Amino acid sequence: MNVNKYTPLLRDLVLILIGTCIYAFGLIYINIPNSLAEGGVTGITLILRGLFGINPAYSTFILNIPIIILGGQILGKRSFYYTIFGTTSLSIWLFIWQKVPLAINLEHDLLISALLAGIVAGFGSGIVYRVGGTTGGSDVIARILEKKQGISVGRSLFCFDILILLASLTYIDLKKMMYTLIFSYVFANIVDAILDGGYSAKGILVISNETKKMAPVLMAVTGRGTSFLKGKGAYSGTDKNILYMVVTSREVMEVKRIIAEYDPQAFISVINVHEVTGEGFTYKRPKKNFLKNLKNSAPSQK
């Protein structure tokens, strides 16, 4: 039996279990005690709880059955199994947390409750989505829209939340519904932040006639790699080497300073890079040796 074959699957299932645990914790100990509503199917379960006293652990599982079937037909076998596991584990965690005698004292501050609930729920859901899982409900619909229409999961969930929150006015007042909107906004942004990647950075494009001279210095100082993209000026018709590199936000000013030393008129474009993987970001960075690398690459002093 090849253990390595099942390692990614086991890792994904463990992360889904952790994510649903965190999400259920926030729902039971922050949302419900502070009368904050929710979006999607979870929001419907809270409406059923508020109006009829139905336990969310049961209604979550029952309401998700038809949605799970729909998701299995559209998203594929892997997502189907992951959704079943995610929905089941969420229902189990909701049942377990209700049995644990714990209270989080937020002194009935609805703003803090909304912010904390959004962070906790967004973090838990983001972990689940990161490995391709869902917790059922509107999560499945959001994943379908992402796959078919390219709409971000966080944005779809926020729209679904608005609709359910309007219905939540049947058991909460307008004030708490507005705080729930804050929760939903924070939740959506936390989810998108986790899905965007483990490291946010800046991409730098440089158009100059001196890119070959500045590239070694930039690599020596920042410890980052650089690449040359072939370009051609639309007006001049001349071929140019466009320099491209990815750095952290705090390194941008240093890169601009070095570029200015070689070409004060260089065209520089700084763009947001939402996800970066590779050496220097997700792996160990090589050690910088300034004296060795800069010895013959520094600009001449005039």
Image (tube, grey):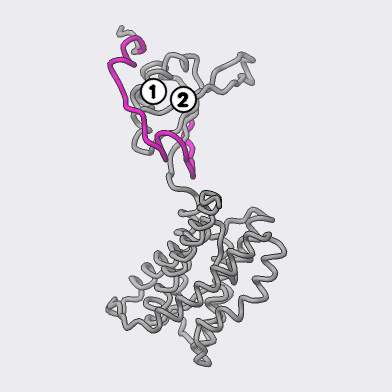
**Quadrant of residue 124 within the rendered picture:** bottom left
- The magenta stretch is 268-297
Q: Position of residue 207 (x, y in %)?
A: 51, 22
Secondary structure of the residue carrying numbered label 1: helix
At 55% from the left and 72% from the top, the residue drawn is: 87
Q: Nearer the viewer, residue 38 or 263?
A: 38
To which residue does mark 2 refer?
Answer: 226
Q: Residue at x 55, y 79 (%)?
A: 60
- Of the numbered discs in the image, which one, if any, rests on residue 218? 1
Secondary element under disc 2, as helix, strand or loop, is strand
Which residue is at a point 31% across and 15% down the rendered structure image? Answer: 292
Label 1: few (<14), some (14–19) or many (≥20) C-alpha neighbours in 10 Å: many
Task: Please state which amino acid type lies under the numbered disc 2.
Answer: Thr
Q: Which is nearer the N-term, disc 1 or disc 2?
A: 1
In percent of width and height, residue 110 lies at: 35, 76
Q: CA distance from mark 1 to mark 2?
A: 8 Å
